[in-house]
Amino acid sequence: MKEFSIIIMVIGDLEENLLKDIKLQLDNMLYPLKVTKVENIPMPKKAYNPQRQQYRTLEFMKALRKHAVDKHSKYLGITSLDLYTEGAEFDFGLALQDMNLCIVSTHRLRPEYYGQPPNPKLLTKRAVKEAIHELGHCFGLEHCYNPRCAMYFSSGVVDTDRKRENFCEQCQKRIRTKITN
Ligand SMILES: [Zn+2]
Ligand SMILES: [Zn+2]
């Protein structure tokens, strides 16, 4: 079996507690994969679009790529900034499977974004689900039609709240063959 590890990289500011909770939960869930270390990388300069007041996801991916040197690792970027790609209103996250890179934005996962009171537990849960989703892409999984599966595509937090942080049985089978082959 190949040895994979997950490396978390934070772009911009992220609360220490949130990061700690996400890392801990991913570590537990992804066992025996190791969530090994956390690096902070600077915000890419060209990422901000003042018209949209959002950040270009692809610029973040480019920045991550420079740090993603270990071929046996999957790199997960986490940012609190509001991400988008051309043609989409926003991105909860994105994965580039061939490069073992993915990213998650917590911006629209915060209850405060929808005028609700802060809820760190809910925020962590949502971030973990979206992180597992993007990492699933990095391991070669596609979107799943099961709304309870982590690989279900979230078009809003309602979808994220409905799905579980685990893969459905089908996706689990698929990922197992990909990891062991
Ligand atoms: Zn997806
Ligand atoms: Zn599934």
Image: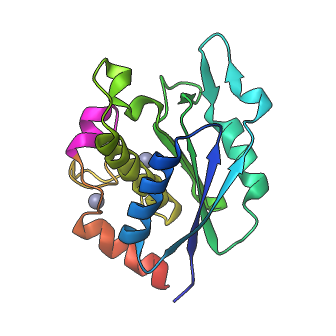
Please state the horizontal and vertical placement of residue 81, each as a whole percent of the image: 56, 31
Q: Magenta stretch?
A: 154-162
Please state the horizontal and vertical placement of residue 17, each as a whole percent of the image: 46, 48
Residue in the foreground of this view, choosing between 158 and 175: 158
- The residue located at (42%, 55%) in the rendering is 21
Say left or right for 136 vs 85.
left
- The residue located at (24%, 54%) in the rendering is 164
Q: Residue farthest to the front?
A: 17
Q: Is residue 75 above or below residue 5?
A: above
Say left or right for 64 vs 88.
right
Q: For residue 157, which quarter of the picture?
A: top left
- The residue located at (38%, 34%) in the rendering is 109
Say left or right for 59 vs 102.
right
**Total tally of numbered discs in the picture:** 0
Q: Main secondary structure of the magenta part?
A: helix
Please state the horizontal and vertical placement of residue 120, each as a whole percent of the image: 34, 40
Residue in the foreground of this view, choosing between 91 and 115: 115
Q: Is residue 83 above or below residue 173?
A: above
Q: Residue farthest to the bottom?
A: 1
Q: Is residue 35 above or below residue 48?
A: below
Residue 153 on the magenta span: no
Please state the horizontal and vertical placement of residue 37, each as a whole percent of the image: 62, 66
Residue 159 on the magenta span: yes
Question: Which quadrant of the frame does ligand 2 lie within?
Answer: bottom left
Q: How is the image coloured?
A: rainbow
Q: For residue 122, which quarter of the picture?
A: top left
- The residue located at (62%, 61%) in the rendering is 100
Say left or right for 37 vs 117.
right
